[in-house]
Image: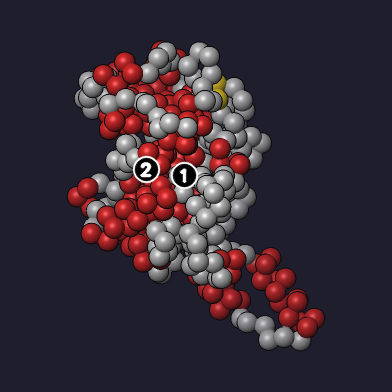
Amino acid sequence: MTREWMSVIDSIPIDWLLESDNPPVRFFTMRELLEYRKNDSELIETKEDLCNYRVTQKILNRQNLDGSWELPNQPYLPKYKSSYWQIMLLAMFGLERTNKSVERGVEKILNFQQPEGGFSTMEGQQKEYEFVRKRGVKKKDPIPPYEDWRSLKNREMQLSCLTGNVCLALIQMGYEDHAAVKNALQWLVEIQNKDGGWLCPYWGAHKNDNHGCFMGTVPPLDAFSEVPKRLLTTSMKKALEQGAEFLLMHRLYQADHHDFSPIKKDWLLLTFPQFFYDILRGISVVTRLGHGADARIDDALRVILNKRLPAGEWPVEKTYTGTMYQNIEQKWRPSKWITLRVLKVLKNIVLTRGHLDLCQE
C-alpha cells in the first residue's frame, strides 16, 4: 500500500475515519487513502456493510415499489427527496448496480432522459401547464396543447448540472457502459461552452449568457473524470482539458476579470453532500485530473487548509439539514465526509508535487 504521502501531513485522523459508525467513509478511507487491495477481506467485509449506514437505510426504506422516491413522475422536485437526488446520494455512499434497490431506482430515472441525451427536471408538471393555460385564457393568447408544451419544456429544462450529476452517480454505480450514460456524456461534449465551461443550453435563464456557469461546469467535469480510460473518447479528453482550464483560470473561485475577487462567498464553505459547487469539489476534480502542481489551485488550497480543526479534522460548513430524509452531519462540527474528501485532495497534491508547499502570498 502506498502511504508515504501521509508522512507529509501532520495528525491525520485515520483511526477516526475508520470507525464503524460510518461504513461508507470507512470503506473509502481503506480503498482510496490506504489503498487496500480489492481482495482484502477487511475491505470486502466493509463493503458488505455499506447498506447498514443509517442514512442509506432511511433512503432505501422510503423508496416506492416502482423504484421512485416521492412522486413517480417528478424526479427532481422536491429537493432533496425525489428520485434524482436519492440516486446521487446512494452513489456517494458507495452502493452499486448489484443492489436491487439501486437497479430499480436507476431504471426509473432513465425514463426521464431526453432524446438528445440530457436529463430534464420537467416531467409531469401539470400544475405549471395549468398556470400557462389560465394565463392564456385571461390574455386571449394561443394555448399550446399539453403534450406539445411538455415536450418543449422538457427539452428546455435539460440541465448540464443535473445531467453531470446523474452521469457521475451512474458511473460510480457501475453503469459506465450503459447506452444512456454514453448518450448523456456525448450531449455534454456537444453543449460545452466555448470558454471551456458549461451552461444549460436551452434554459431561458441562460439564453443571453456567454460565460460558463460554475454550477453547470463542475458536475459534467466530475462525471468525465470518473469515466474509465478505455471509454474516454478524444472529444471527452478535450472536454476534460478545456473544463479543467476553465476552473483553473478562475483559480477555482475567483473572477478573472475583477482582480480575482471571490465570485461567490458561499463557494468557500465546505459542503456535503456535494450536489453543486464549492472550492472543495472544484479542487477535488482538478487534482484528480492531474493538476495538483498547478499554482492556480493554491489560493483555494490555502482556504481549505486554514479551516482545519485542532485535532486534524475538517468541519462541514454547509448542509441540507431538514430537506433530506435523514440529516447526515451537524454543521460546524468535525465531518468525516469533508475530512475524507480533503485528504483525498491532499494525497493527490502530495503525489504530484512531493510536498504541500504553497506559493508565496
| x 45%, y 59%: residue | 198
Q: Secondary structure at mark 2?
A: helix
Give, as a three-letter code, the residue at label 2: Val
Residue placed at 75% from the left, 77% from the top? 135
**Residue 8, how many percent across, how many down?**
33, 18
**Residue 69 spot, x, y in % from top left:** 55, 47
Q: CA distance from mark 2 to mark 1?
A: 9 Å
Residue receiving disc 1: 252
Q: From this view, report whether residue 121 is shown above or below residue 250.
A: below
In depth, the one of 264 and 190 nearer the eye is 264
Q: Which residue is mark 2?
A: 286
Q: Position of residue 307 (x, y in %)?
A: 54, 25
Residue 263 at what x, y percent from top left?
Answer: 57, 48
Q: Is residue 22 visible?
A: yes
Q: In this image, 211 relative to 178: left or right?
A: right
Badge 2 vs badge 1, beta-carbon distance below 8 Å: yes
Q: Quadrant of the N terminus?
A: top left
- Most extreme residue toward the front is 360
- Give left or right: position of 24 versus 6: right
In this view, the mark in front (2 or 1): 1
The picture quadrant where one finds residue 140 is: bottom right
Mark positioned earlier in the residue sequence (2 or 1) = 1
